[in-house]
Image (spheres, rainbow, N blue to C red):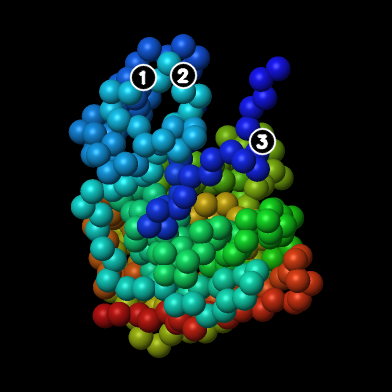
Amino acid sequence: MVCGMSSSSAFKPPVIKGVGPSTVGVPANATLSAIDFLTAKFNAISREEWQLRFEAGEILNAVGRVMAPQDSLLKESHLHYYRSIRNEPELPFKANVIFQDEFLLVVDKPHFMPVTPGGRYLQQSLLVQLKQQLNLPELSPMHRIDRETAGLVVFSVRAQDRNAYQELFRLRQVEKTYEAIAGAPETSTLNPQFPLVHRSLMAEDTKFFRMRELTTDVSPSHNEFNSETWIDCVERILTPKIVIQEDGIKELALARYQLKPVTGQRHQLRVHMNSLGLPLLGDQFYPLVLLGAEENDNFEHPLQLLAKSIFFKDPVSGFLRSFKSSLSLKILA
């Protein structure tokens, strides 16, 4: 009887420059060369790009042998490959580590920086930068915040703890508080009274980078919801702001809000505030798309949304964990 390698002896591709490999299975009796297979499998990536990755030694087989473009896949079970981005834009700011121990890493993320690789960003993503800077190859985010949002992101340091920490968020055993700046309550035609709890059924928009709330006509039941946020208006801001709205450019009275999400839908806080007639200052997607998903950011006008604090009981150490961002929202002229 022929035995395969045990999981403990199987080849584990290394993390290179903070980036772990992706893996793709090879069909039985594959007759294509390695480069032909990858080009056909991932047709959004050009053959020239795959050639560069082969030349850089970024394509490995199941036992870790560096593959050549014309190598046969007849006896291969799967390939490991490393993602790379040519001419990646450089972000002009860095994250700030505010806490680290053997279990957790807590970081203040600046606006515009993605937590994980995606789109135009790989090396500039928070996760990849931290893996490189701190030599933590098993680092994994417990949760994510929008690229446009600033503030606290919590990471699990050890792979063995990852599921326990992520379970906290799945079971909603984490208290998160955000700070936001938007129009004062009286600027909304809906006349919202704070504090309030906003619930809705959210789904992906026809534009892939946006979310939307379903109306009662679309929703099976008006009582059905998958998103919930507690919101309060905590401060009036004396200086008004000139903003672009659906009905034109106008001077807008502003206020500071505190938001506590119960659920974690993508763009939830932005969508909920927009639904109340109070879109967040600096939001390029709601209510109007002012900037395409792949267009260059305007670093002078960030989204006025900050992940301010987080509290939970640590399932690994048993400690009560409470962290507060050192960042603050600043309204620019």
Residue name at image x 42 percent, y 64 percent: 132
Callout 3 amino acid: Ser
Which residue, given by chain and number where applicable, does mark 1 sit on? 72
Q: Which mark is residue 322?
A: none
Q: Residue at x 35, y 32 (%)?
A: 67
Image disc number at residue 75: 2
> What is the residue that sits farthest to the front in this orientation?
1
Are discs 2 and 3 less than 8 Å apart at CB? no
| On screen, residue 66 above or below 303 | above
Q: CA distance from mark 3 to mark 1?
A: 25 Å
Left or right of 241: which side holds 254? right
Instruction: Rate crowding at label 2 as few (under 14), some (14 to 19) or many (20 or more) other CA atoms within 10 Å.
Output: few
Q: Amino acid at mark 2?
A: Lys
Residue 125 as seen in the image, left or right of residue 88: right
Q: CA distance from mark 2 to mark 3?
A: 19 Å
Q: Which residue is mark 3?
A: 6
